[in-house]
Image (tube, grey):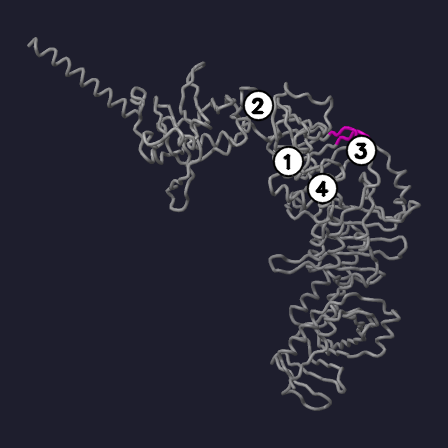
Amino acid sequence: MRKLLPTIFLFVVTLMVLAAAALLFVEGSLARLTGWYHFRPGMSLFPEENLNRLSEVSWIRISDLHDVIECERAQDGSWWIISPFRDRMSSQAVQLILNFTANARLVDSLPMNHTTRASIREYGVDTSPHQITLKIQTGKDDMTTLARYTLGSASPWFADAEDGEHLLPTTYLRTDFYGRDKRIHVVSGNILSIFKNGLEGLREPHPVTINVDDLLRLQIKRSADTKTDGKEQIIVLSRDSAQSPWTILSPTLCEANQDAVDELVANLERLKAIRIADAADVKLPERPAVELSFLMQDKTTLRMNIYAPFVSPTDGQLLCYATVSDRSVVFTLAMEPKVQRKGGYANLVNTILSLPILPKDTLVRIRNAMDTVYLADLPMDLDTLRSRHFANLTDKDIDKAVLRSRYAPYPLMLRRIPGDSEGQVDDVWMYATEGQRFREADTKVVEAFLNSLGSVPVDSFLRDFTPLEDTQAEIRKYGLNMPDYLLLVQPRECAARAVLFGVDMPIVRDRAPRTFAIKRYNDGKESYWVGMEQNTLSICRLNPKLTKHFSLSSLNWRKRNLVQFPVSSLRKLTLCYHKAPLELHYDYIGEEWSGTLGGEDVTPRINPHRTNYYVRHLQNIRVKNWISSTDEDAVAALAHPVFTVILELELADYSDVEEIVLDDLRDSTEDLSAPTDEQAVREMLTEKSETDAAFRRIALDEKKTEKRTITIDIAPAKMNSVHPLFYGRLREEGSLFILSFEDAQGLDGQLLDR
């Protein structure tokens, strides 16, 4: 029995050693004893329990042959480089490192016994390594390593992404996480691009890191220089929320150019530093050239100082220093693109840049598309950031408009008749001027006039006032107290409405009427138009493209359609441009044409397709301009027209209804405080209204018909042009117009087959 005891003891010890070895092998810890780990293609580099805790990583160490940086995560989740000097770390770089660690899979392991020392250089794990260590906090002063590896060069192979479509780049890698394993592996993924500028490139390159939606206030303080006329300038922009428009509060109170402000904020966020240095190593000028202050929704403030530019001694590029309040570093930013400033090449570049090939704003957009933002391109002056529109209005914002002139006895009145978007019925604009009744206006002309208020930029701002400053002296100086034109605009009512206590009310307060004064001003050197909106703080020099729309002549606003008639009303069409007139009769019900030419029946020769197209052409013709009925040249030319078109129509007579509707419109438009469209329609549809009876007669088909003849005379104008214009006349009403060559030529149609 005593002889068996040593044998039994050795057997038990052997079992225990084998069990421990198996356990260590399964857990991956046997490599710490043997210096060798059993990797298989497709497996992760690190244990799954480690990879599942990567979100808890709070410390990273990265080193190459020259530098070492240590990084830690703050309580708010941001990453900071703490050595060699503290600074914010690029969140993109951190995310790439964590994603690579989690997703890297073994593709292959290189057999070291078949490699030479010279061939190892291409793997980069010894010649250009980047060693990365990731740790988590396990106690107050204790940390545990989750992963550690050394990146080498990019591998020439690709790994299957296992989605049947994509291939992944690969990288040479070595890890001593499990022990003294010296093998070189090929793993999926490649993050070497984040090290292309060295370890310093891992610092956050963007000086301004804010959430744009939380920005409520932006202040720009510029020191006195030639761009600010030798005076310090402070521009304050503010908004209530991310959905609210920007407003300039200082140096004057005015509307901001929303696109320019959004572009400025976006490009400030996109600014990238060329270099980032410790503040202790850079000597800054005493005062910054520009001071920026960002007030966020949580009341925190970020400040950025930009210093005067200087020329780089190495490549001649114009650079500048900048600092921000939440980072104790100095950024080197590019003021403008790098160009060679000396020699013949520089002269060529400067000559090309000075050519008006592309506008400056186009060049800026091209640079932005290339993700390159230069400080010189940022709009930080008042003239660029403010709205340069005379009014932020379009035809979609306006219900009524009245244009008065001190030189005309009658105003121009415009009134919108609402359409129906669901019924695909467009809005109709009515106009009244020269003491005439309301008529349908040309929609394109009205829209061009109203849209010009918000689309044509002013030439310049002649005078800005502070909110407490007396403006009357300057208003009298420019003559705006007695303007040549006074434009009154009534904005549309709020579309969102509710019934409160039995009263129909807008959910949002309706905008108040707006008044604009326009005057022709002579400063002794030149004459130009000036304008000002009532209760605002700026006097503008207006662009002639805006004032050209200011007309009180009914000829300007009259609908440009030459004739308007439904095809169903057409009874006879006569073309008088042959020796004998061509008379065509139309049967709308049977859709048939018949006719005579010089008393001879030509019905078989009538081409119905050409004839129908001719009628549609008549309906679609738009005159270039209506002209005065006393125009001498037109009257002389039309004394002998080259051809005449006569339309004989049979129309339903709506004059009784039209009279009531137009009278209501005229009464409601004389004053801007008149009932709105909705109120007018409601009154028109009540049983007490005379209009209701007219509508009933229409519904019961109790309407008269009238016969109407429209005679159109056409004659060429005496103009030296390849495509001359034509004069025209509506003979019955005596209206004269100008017609384009193409439209006049279309009236000379061949409607008969030969």
Q: Residue at x 71, y 40 (%)?
A: 346
Question: For this rendering, which residue is in front, 405 or 432?
Answer: 405
Q: CA distance from mark 3 to mark 1?
A: 35 Å
Q: Is residue 36 visible?
A: yes
Contact? badges 3 and 1 (CB < 8 Å) = no
Q: Amino acid at mark 4?
A: Gly
Contact? badges 1 and 2 (CB < 8 Å) = no
Q: Secondary structure at mark 2?
A: strand
Among numbered discs 1 and 2, the one appearing first in the sequence:
2
Q: Secondary structure at mark 1?
A: loop
Q: Which residues, given as a range, are shown in magenta? A: 221-234
Which residue, given by chain and number where applicable, does mark 4 sit on?
344
List the single residue furthest toward the right: 524
Question: For this rendering, which residue is in front, 582 or 320?
Answer: 320
Q: CA distance from mark 1 to mark 2?
A: 31 Å
Q: Please count the marks in the image.
A: 4
For the residues carrying marks 4 and 1, which lies nearer the camera in this image?
4
Q: Residues within 10 Å of mark 1 (few under 14, many from 20)?
A: some
Position of residue 160 measured from the top left corner of the image (x, y, whole percent)? 38, 42
Q: Amino acid at mark 1?
A: Ser
Which residue, given by chain and number where applicable, does mark 1 sit on?
241
Among numbered discs 3 and 1, the one appearing first in the sequence:
3
Q: Residues within 10 Å of mark 4 (few under 14, many from 20)?
A: few
Which residue, given by chain and number where applicable, does mark 3 sit on?
226
- Give the quadrant of the C terminus: bottom right
Q: CA distance from mark 4 to mark 1?
A: 52 Å
